Amino acid sequence: MALPCSYGSHCAALPFPAVVSRAASSPPPRSRGRWPSLPPAGCFHAAPRDAALVSGSAAGGVSRRRCELFDLHQHIVPFAESWAWQQSIVTRRKGLVGTDEDHSDTLIALQHPPVYTLGIDSTEDYLHFDVKDAPFEVHRIDRGGEVTYHGPGQLVMYPIINLRYHQMDLHWYFRSLEEVIIRALQSAFSIKASRVEGLTGVWVGDKKVAAIGIHVSRWIAYHGLALNVTTDLTPFQLIVPCGIKDRGVGSIKEILQIASDGKEIDETALIDKAYRTLLKEFAEVFQLSLYHNPNWDLQESKNFS
C-alpha cells in the first residue's frame, strides 16, 4: 500500500530506487561529511546507545515499545542513500514478521539536499519544468501522493513502524502523524495548526507546513513526514505541491517572522527546537521509548538491491 500527501493508490512492483532526472548542469548533491565516518549530530550527541531519550509507561503502567533513533537532523543526506537505508531496514523487519522478534521500531531524522520526489502513480503534469532538464534531482518512489520538494531547512522524519504493535489502521496512522506535528507547533512555537478535511498534512491558515507520505508492506510503514522549518520555499513554485492547486506552502520561520515584524531568527536553533519537540510528541502519540543509536552506517545501504 502506498499512500499520500492525500490518499493515494496501491503499490505495484517497480524497480526502485529510480532517478527520473538530475539537473543537467549540476553534479550530484553531496552530503556534509563522508559516510559512514561522520559522527552523529544534534541535541543528543552524547547519549549512550542504550539510554532512553524519551521513555516511560503507557496508560495502565504497560511498558512502552522501544524505538531506535538515528539522529542526523542537522545533516544533509542525499535522498537515494536515505531511501536505500530505509529499504534495508524494512527488508530486515519484514523477515521478523511472525517470529515475535521484532522488538523495536525505528525513527530516522535528517534533512535532504534539494530534490523533488513523485509518488508511485504521480503525474508529471504537476511539474512546471521538463523532467529531462530538471533544476534538481527527481526521484519516483514507492509512496502515494503527488510531487513534493525536500531541501535544507526541512526536517524529515522517517518512522519505520510495525503497525501490528500499534493499530492496523492507516487512517489512524495518518492522523497520528498529523497530531505529532500539530502538538509540536503548538507547544514549541504557539502556532495553531490544523488538518484540512479530505487532505493529508498539516496547515497553518491556507498554507501547508508539513507533508506526509507513506508506503505500507506487511503492515510495516515507512517514508513519513516533512516539516518546513527554515526551508527556502522558492523551489515549490516549480511544482504543484501534492497536486493541490488552490493552497500555498509555508514554513515555521516565515510564520514567526511575520508575527514578529521580520525579527532575525537563529535558523540552527529553530531547527533544533522543532526537532526536540517533534521527538517528544512522537514518543507521546505513539507511546514509544526512544533510544539513540550512534552506530548508523549508510555503506551497507548503498549495496542494497
Image (cartoon, grey):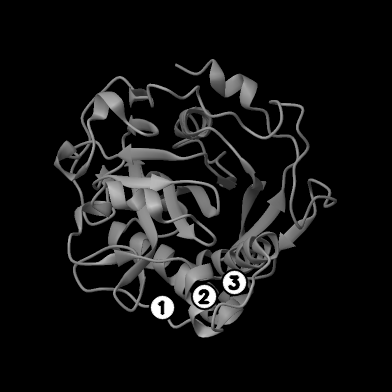
Residue 6's label in the rendered image is none
Counting residues from the N terminus, which is met first, the one under dot 3 or under dot 2?
3
Q: CA distance from mark 1 to mark 2?
A: 7 Å
- Image quarter where the C terminus lies is top left
Q: Amino acid at mark 1?
A: Ala
* Secondary structure of the residue carrying numbered label 3: loop
> Can residue 167 be seen by looking at this rendering?
yes
Give the residue pinned by disc 3.
58
Judging depth in this view, the residue of 139 and 103 nearest the camera is 139
Disc on res. 185: 2
Q: Give whichever of discs 1 and 2 has the lower sequence position.
A: 2
Per the rendering, the mark at residue 193 is 1
Q: Position of residue 46 (x, y in %)?
A: 85, 51
Q: Amino acid at mark 2?
A: Leu
Residue 269, image quadrant: bottom right
The x, y position of residue 199, in whole percent, is 23, 65
Amino acid beneath label 3:
Ala
User: Can you give x and y, in whole percent of width and height, for residue 115 in the image?
Assistant: 42, 38
Given residues 193 and 170, the one toward you in this image is: 193
Q: Secondary structure at mark 1?
A: loop
Local packing at callout 3 (Cα closer than 10 Å; few below 14, some 14-19, many 20+) is some
Q: Quadrant of residue 217?
A: top left
Which residue is pictured at 20% across the width and 53% down the height? 243
